Image: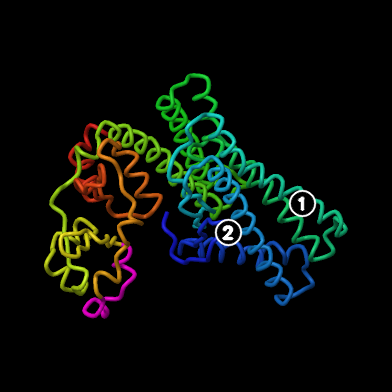
Amino acid sequence: MRSSVKLGSIFGVPIGLNYSWFLTFGFVILILAIRVYPDIFPDSGARLYWPMAIVSGVLFFASILTHEMAHSLIAKAYGIPVKGITLFIFGGVSQITKEAARPLAEFIMAFAGPATSVLLAGVFGLLWWLAGAGEDKPLAVVLEWLWLMNLFLGAFNLAPGFPMDGGRILRSALWGITGNYRQSTRWASRVGQFMAYTLMAVGFAGILRLIPWLDPVGSLWLIVLGMFLESAARQSWRQVRTLEFLKTFRARDIMTTDFPTGEASASIAEVLAANPVAARVGCVFVVEGERVAGLIQADALRGLSRARWQTTPAGELMTPTVRVRVVSPEEDAASILQTMEAEDLSCLPVVEGGRLLGLVSREGLARLLVGHRELIA
């Protein structure tokens, strides 16, 4: 899940918003402003409802961010890279680029989110009680709504629908009992798919008015949520199969020795014109004479406007060799892919004893996976 709007970082974890988040944020505020709060304060007007709704929406999504931050900080404590947190249409997701090495680590990492939501529910519940615990004051009503929503968020995430938190807790328990990570993931994924189909069935029943208390909007939301969970569970299992497959290959098996190079003094436009393969590989080695001086990754090219390609020397855009991330020829392809994901790299040089042997690119890994897609499936 890529961020569309960058918000900065907290404790070294980048925070972003996907454009789909604005739909949910707007929907939550709209429902609170035109239905929920007017029912509680029928004699007030929009000048009260909308500020209450906006404050509620902002604090609710801040609670979701705190929930995801708990996952991310525990992951970082275990040495697991975290690419960032993205808020999107269904809440939030921590982009943790590697799985935990042990069942207990995964259990703690997964449980941290719901536990944080329940803790926040307790904090908002205490503030609600201190504010009078009634429905005659706007502040108390907002705090009550936040208390209930955080409690629901914590409880819902504990449902065993992999890859939700509860599903990951289930997998960690199965993994600890059986010692089989692969089989535990498969079982947890199946439970996640069952939960997804159940949500969709309830949603369809609501649309057909077989469940009187479920309105059409809520029914449609359950169907969409179920579809998302089913896809996520299926993709999580496929990801495990993909990483298993990639672990059978080493960097020396998949690297290419035909990689693009350009002089440090040449402009970016000249380097790319002389190396048509650069767009496919996603990076260019910068040389000074016979010496490799650095590497230009795809993200550096994306960050430079095309208008400056003619005037920017390759040496100015490159990452110097001393700072370039490299891999050994014996490193497995699964670890290489996870490193690329964690550090947003398009390629990694293969180096042994200070000597450049080749290059592993995302494009090369993609071709490998496409060529064996039937085996992986």
Side of 146 where 3 appears, left or right: left
Side of 204 where 365 appears, left or right: left
Q: Position of residue 52 (x, y in %)?
A: 71, 68
Q: Is residue 170 above or below residue 314?
A: above
Q: Would residue 230 be counted in the magenta stretch?
A: no
How many numbered discs sit on the rendered protein? 2
Inspect the image, locate mark 1, and give the three-letter code of the amino acid beneath it.
Answer: Val
| Residue 341: mark | none
Q: Nearer the viewer, residue 106 or 292?
A: 292
- Does any portion of residue 299 appear in the rendered image? yes
Side of 38 where 180 appears, left or right: left
| Quarter holding residue 282 | bottom left
Q: Nearer the viewer, mark 1 or mark 2?
A: 2
- Circle 2 is placed at which residue position? 10
| Coloring scheme used | rainbow
| Residue 123: mark | 1
State the CA–CA distance, disc 1 to disc 2: 21 Å
Q: Position of residue 162 (x, y in %)?
A: 48, 36
What's drawn in magenta, residue-wise?
299-312
* Residue found at x 22% / y 38%: 373
